[in-house]
Image (cartoon, helix red, strand yellow):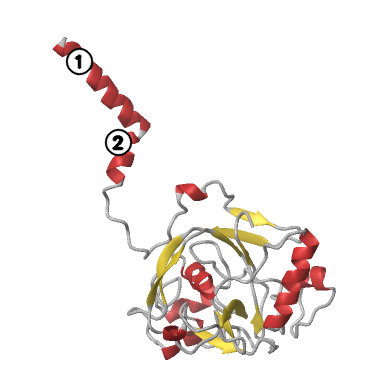
Amino acid sequence: MTRNWSRKRHRILTTLLLSGFLMACSDSDREVAKPDVAAQPAASESVFEPTAMNGIGIEFILIPAGEFMMGCGKDDWACEEAEKPQHHVRINQPFYLGKYEVTQGEWEIVMRENPSKFKGDSNPVENVSWNDVQVFIQRLNEKEGTNKYRLPTEAEWEYAARAGTATAYHFGNDVANMGRYAWYDGNSSNHPHPVGQKLGNPWGLYDMHGNVWEWVADGYEDSYSSRNRPANPLSRVLRGGGWDANPWSLRSAFRRGGKPDSRSGFYGFRLAFSPGA
């Protein structure tokens, strides 16, 4: 009987190992890795498609839920007061973010006009204010019979731009590599360029550094220590730097404010939406 039980126990253990059960149990005791590399979507996010495209051809990438240190950190070489203090942020739900900045062709489909100074269907739309973007979002939602489209929050934007990294740029700290990833004052010839021509970040997002500054949802305050105050409606956050900016302004942590009615050939945006919205 003892021998039969030993054989039975052996078969049970073998079955569990083959099913991956024991592996899953052992993983639960492992130390959670720090977010210094691109995180993978959690199992609960696997029900969502990794990419999406809407009715006018805007492509989106699924950004996994996770956590990161927002703001200027020890690996950043040019901290500003507006980027401090660095603080922990948890993104509780996955969300979709535009693979590219919204283009002039996409804007024209919705708005029936093109305000951009540097014309080109594949160029990012620019010379649009934060208020203009709200009108675009409203009309796009009406066009598609939804209310899901929005600007990303500032935290979502930086989390997606970093893509699991903690360096000044998603590609590291070496400014010498900037030209492979961004249009900026060192290579833009003083104008924006078609989206997606440079290398993307680890999560497949393009032009997160450079090309045009990107409006996000939040009101701007001059320090994260002020983030618990009511949002400032007189100034909105711009992220990512643009074709006019130096490498210092293209860092993942860099932030600036602009009046919500301000238009500039430097200012554009990308869209976001939450799954199930």
Q: Residues within 10 Å of mark 1 (few under 14, many from 20)?
A: few
Rendered location of residue 167, percent (x, y)? 39, 74
Res 79 quadrant in image: bottom left
Residue found at the very far left of the displayed protein: 2
61 with respect to 128 (left or right): left
Q: CA distance from mark 2 to mark 1?
A: 20 Å
Q: Which residue was labeled with disc 1?
A: 5
238 with respect to 1 (left or right): right
SS assignment at label 2: helix
Front one among 220 and 55: 220
SS assignment at label 1: helix
Res 168 quadrant in image: bottom left
Rendered location of residue 31, percent (x, y)? 27, 55
Give the residue at x 76% y 58%.
Answer: 55
Question: Nearer the N terminus, badge 2 or badge 1?
Answer: 1
- Amino acid on which disc 1 is placed: Trp
Front one among 246 and 187: 246
Give the residue at x 20% y 11%.
Answer: 4
Q: Is residue 49 above or below residue 114?
A: above
Q: Quadrant of the C terminus?
A: bottom right
Q: Which residue was labeled with disc 2?
A: 22
Front one among 78 and 82: 82
Q: Which mark, by number, is residue 38?
A: none
- Amino acid on which disc 2 is placed: Leu
Give the residue at x 80% y 78%.
Answer: 114
Residue found at the very far right of the displayed protein: 112
